[in-house]
Amino acid sequence: MNDPFKILGVSRDATDAEIKDAYRKLARKYHPDNFANDETARAMAEEKMKEINEAYDAVQEQRKNGSYSGGSDTSDNHSKYVSVRQYINARRIGEADSILESIPLNERGAQWHFLKGCVCASKGWYFDAQSYFTTACNMDPNNAEYRNALNNMRSASQSYSGGYNTSTMQGCSGCDLCSSLLCADCLCELCGGDLIACC
């Protein structure tokens, strides 16, 4: 299928209401009943309605699981990214990271960098997370999910200092614990309080 957002005539960062409105306008325009007296036009309208319905369903599904990647991922990678999001939501960060690392370098697009940023943030590697979010935004500048994550990470980074870790902690101090809790809170807020929506 072509880009479902283009089929509906909306941008990727359109609101749910804008998407629904665009769908309804197209459905009214191409409804087969409008062409009852012309069999050829009716058949064409039925095909167009099928395309519109599929596009709307695809956008709804992508919004639901946050999986839209601009159409650049292979179907194999798409399923991997869905699994990564599920693992992150279940706090199984190691497994999420393993899947990401299994994806070849030449197939690592914007969604890969976004999810890698979520993994890094979960590990407390905030600077790395921000760097990955920045790359994701540069690769897909119109993706609101990536932009929100980057903006929220930047805002959150100003609320804590000294909380950046570059490797697994060998010990734990009160400051480390506070920083980790702050980051966990920030990570959940990156995309509205639910990791699966964010990552």
Image (spheres, rainbow, N blue to C red):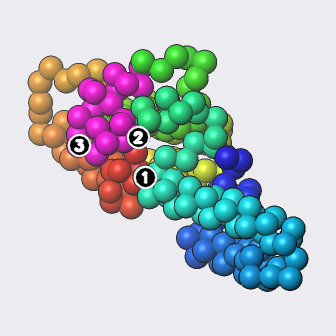
Q: What residue is disc 1 on?
A: 65
In the image: residue 25, left or right of residue 161: right
**Residue 122: mark in rendering:** none
Q: Nearer the viewer, residue 191 or 28?
A: 28
Is residue 99 at all visible to an observer of this figure?
yes
Query: In the rendering, which numbered label is found on residue 82?
Result: 2
- Residue 186 at what x, y percent from top left? 33, 51
Where residue 111 sits in the image (x, y, percent)? 53, 37
Q: Are marks 1 and 2 in contact (CB under 8 Å)?
A: yes
What secondary structure is marked by label 3?
Answer: loop
From the image, tell me which residue sits under label 3.
90
Tell me if residue 133 is in the magenta stretch: no
Is 187 placed left or right of 6 in the picture? left
| Residue 175 in view | no
Residue range corresponding to the magenta coloring: 82-101
Q: What SS does tag 2 mark?
A: helix
N-terminal of the pair, mark 1 or mark 2, is 1
Q: CA distance from mark 3 to mark 2?
A: 13 Å
**Could you say where residue 169 lies in the image, as x and y percent from the top left?**
19, 24
Q: Amino acid at mark 3?
A: Ala
Identify which residue is drawn at 44% across, 35% down: 79
